[in-house]
Image (cartoon, helix red, strand yellow):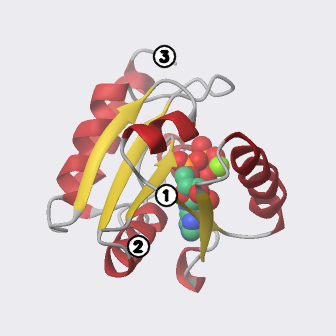
Amino acid sequence: MNTAIYPGSFDPPTNGHRDIIERASRIFDKVIVCIMENTKKKPLFSMEERLKMLQSLARKYSNVEVDYYRGLLVDYARLKNAAIVVKGLRGMGDFEYELQMALVNHQLAPDVETMFLMTSYRYSYLSSSIVKEIAYLGGDIKDLVPPEVHSVICEKIARLKEDGN
Ligand SMILES: Nc1ncnc2c1ncn2[C@@H]1O[C@H](COP(=O)(O)OP(=O)(O)OP(=O)(O)O)[C@@H](O)[C@H]1O
Ligand SMILES: [Mg+2]
């Protein structure tokens, strides 16, 4: 059985993430979407909120699980007996970063391969940051995020604005 780990910060999940999850679930026997703690980013949504959102949108894929991990991705992959890490690529910005990550992870764990799925054209502009920015500025994010998580995101941003943040 081939298991792929799909790591990210998912702060919050977007239609771009959902698209990668769905496509990966058709390729691999099992996909584990794993929220990784990124020491360089300060997330808006708590780990628990992100877990709940991902679980609600992953429910319809029978071979997709959701988890979180604080540590090295390759250690998590080994823990789960997974030989594949799957990532999405939107453009050269992603490529430069992902090339470095794939090479360093291969150095740390030669038995773990990183595989890339090209973004779907219609989601190529989409990131968690842009979704947060649009929502914060009062724009409509309905077509940018999965319906299962839309209200959670809007409520969180509304609360933030009320608190003056
Ligand atoms: N629209 C998209 N199309 C294809 N892949 C995507 C898309 N959005 C994110 N990904 C991929 O999903 C993985 C996790 O991404 P991450 O959680 O960092 O989201 P992000 O949208 O890049 O967030 P941020 O704006 O915080 O950088 C990465 O491999 C990233 O390339
Ligand atoms: Mg990013």
| Residue at figure coordinates x 84%, y 57% from the top left | 96
Q: Quadrant of the N terminus?
A: bottom left
Q: Residue at x 42, y 53 (%)?
A: 82
At 40% from the left edge and 44% from the top edge, which residue is drawn?
A: 34
Q: CA distance from mark 2 to mark 1?
A: 14 Å
Q: Kindly report the distance in space between the C-alpha atoms of the residues bearing marks 3 and 2.
A: 39 Å
Front residue of 106 and 16: 106
**Which numbered dot is residue 24?**
2
In this picture, residue 164 sits left or right of residue 156: right
In this view, the mark in front (3 or 1): 1
Query: Residue drawn at (45%, 61%), measured in percent from left and top?
Result: 17
- Amino acid on which disc 3 is placed: Gly
Secondary structure state at the residue bearing disc 2: helix
Would the CB of label 1 be found within 8 Å of ligand 1?
Answer: no
Does the closest atom of ligand 1 sit within 8 Å of the Cβ of label 2?
Answer: no
Q: Are marks 2 and 1 in contact (CB under 8 Å)?
A: no
Q: Earlier in the sequence, mark 3 or mark 1?
A: 1
Residue type, label 1: Ala
Which residue is situated farthest in the front direction here? 111
Q: Is residue 34 visible?
A: yes
Q: Is residue 48 left or right of residue 129?
A: left
Quadrant in which residue 3 is drawn: bottom left
Circles 3 and 1, Cβ within 8 Å, touching? The answer is no
Q: Is residue 27 above or below residue 1?
A: below
Q: Which mark is residue 83?
A: 1
Quarter of the image where ligand 1 sits: bottom right
Can residue 127 be seen from the camera position used here?
no
Residue 164's tag is: 3
Q: Quadrant of residue 91?
A: bottom right
The kind of residue tagged 2 is Ala
Which of the 4 quarters of the picture holds residue 161? Answer: top left
